[in-house]
Image (cartoon, rainbow, N blue to C red):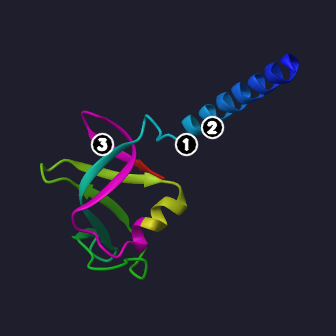
Amino acid sequence: MNRFRMVTLLLVLAISIVGLSSVSSFAADPASQSVQGNVICLIPDYKKGTVTPVIATGPCNTLPPHQHVLMTKEGTVYSLQGLQDGLMKIALMPQKEDVTMAGKIEGNNYGWVLIVN
């Protein structure tokens, strides 16, 4: 009977350790940060050699291929970069004003980049 209790106790302890380690693996990426602002589409005009900044009122995936930046209320501009899936999510967003985006922030004295997932 004592052997049964010991095996049961060890089994419960092992399950608890596995459960706690799996919960911690679902925690948010500590390097990920959130930024709030307006997503601005930089629509190119190849004939003029210029770019027109636009805050789209809906998905912008039907516009010519273009870059996106996020501008905060304080005026900080983040170039939005990442894998194709993450960038496509930005193009398909129905709302581009006052949005919160998460990702890894990199930057220096020349500019900031938000790498989205």
The residue where tag 1 is placed is 26
Q: Which mark is residue 22?
A: 2
Residue range corresponding to the magenta coloring: 90-114
Q: Which residue is mark 3?
A: 112
Q: Number of labelled discs? A: 3
Residue type, numbered disc 3: Trp
* Residue under the point 66% across and 28% down: 17
Residue 62 image label:
none
Q: CA distance from mark 3 to mark 1?
A: 28 Å
Classify mark 2: helix, strand or loop. Answer: helix
In this image, 11 relative to 71: left or right? right
* Horizontal side, residue 54 vs residue 18: left or right: left
Instruction: Name which quarter of the figure residue 23 lies in.
Output: top right
Against 50, residue 105 (above or below) is above
Label 1 sits on a secondary structure element that is loop
Magenta-span inclusion, residue 91? yes
Q: Amino acid at mark 1?
A: Phe
